[in-house]
Amino acid sequence: MPPDPLILGFDTSAAHCAAALLSGNRVIASRHEDMAKGQAERLMPLLEQVLADAGVQWSDLAGLGVGVGPGNFTGIRIAVSAARGLALGLGIPAVGVSMFEALALDQPRPLTALVDARRDMVYAQDFETGQTAAPRLIARSDLNNPWPLVETLPEATLAVHIARIAGDRIQEGGEIARPAPLYLRAADAAPASDPPPVILP
């Protein structure tokens, strides 16, 4: 019987850089590092370390899973861009996995998955048996849901869940859309305060 395909999952949607390599549902190698910034420089070396820990090459991978948010605006773009580039270069599929899906994996339905949005706000998505509602941004005080709330997942487990979900989708076959960031509100970066450059004649 041939071995299960190797799926590499990773995420930089918050203050971390996390990755896991799976063969089926078996974790072959995983790493995660807490970091407030620097994910752009650290992600590829971290992925290389995960592959080295498992003794495999990039060419051994059958697919990728990447966290698409919601979360840090720049962090999401870093991981999604890396996944798109790797998928193109390796000729393998890349699957975008939301934080909600990762939180809800293996949890009994119905439930509401929550992601902190700061300023007393949360991103929320309801998972019922057989259907899933659209995600929304609401005030935490406005949560009026009788279902269990799920909002925490260790970074190492997050990457494992991303890889598992991606592997399942790849195994199902069918068309897989390119991963895209899941933004539920606009970036909250302040506009530049520097004066515009002087245009010389």
Image (tube, grey):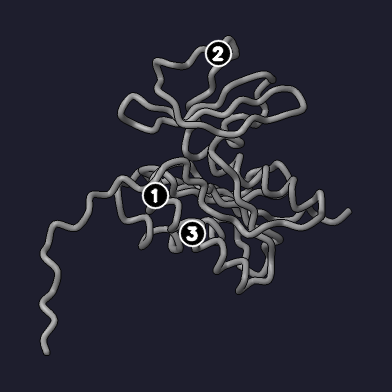
Q: Residue furthest front?
A: 201
| Mark number displayed over residue 53 | none
Give above or below for 2 relative to 24. below
* 72 and 194: which is toward the camera: 194
Determine whether, in the image, residue 20 is placed left or right of residue 7: left
Tell me where residue 62 appears, x and y as whole percent: 71, 61
Residue under pointer 2: 145
Q: Quadrant of the C terminus?
A: bottom left
Indicate the quadrant where residue 121 lies: top left
| Mark number displayed over residue 73 | 1
Tell me where residue 74 appears, x and y as whole percent: 37, 53
Q: CA distance from mark 2 to mark 3?
A: 42 Å
Q: Residue furthest right?
A: 1
Mark 3 residue type: Gln
Determine whether, in the image, residue 102 is placed left or right of residue 114: right
Tell me where residue 80 appears, x and y as whole percent: 51, 57
Mark 2 residue type: Asn
State the residue at coordinates (48%, 33%). Answer: 154
Q: Residue furthest top?
A: 146
Tell me where residue 195 appears, x and y as whole percent: 11, 65
How many marks the image carries: the answer is: 3
First in sequence: mark 2 vs mark 3: 3
Specify few, some or many for label 2: CA neighbours under 10 Å numbering under 14, 14-19, or 20 or more: few
Mark 1 residue type: Phe
Would you say the residues marked 2 and 3 are in contact, meaning their CB atoms lie under 8 Å apart? no
| Mark number displayed over residue 49 | 3
Specify few, some or many for label 1: CA neighbours under 10 Å numbering under 14, 14-19, or 20 or more: many
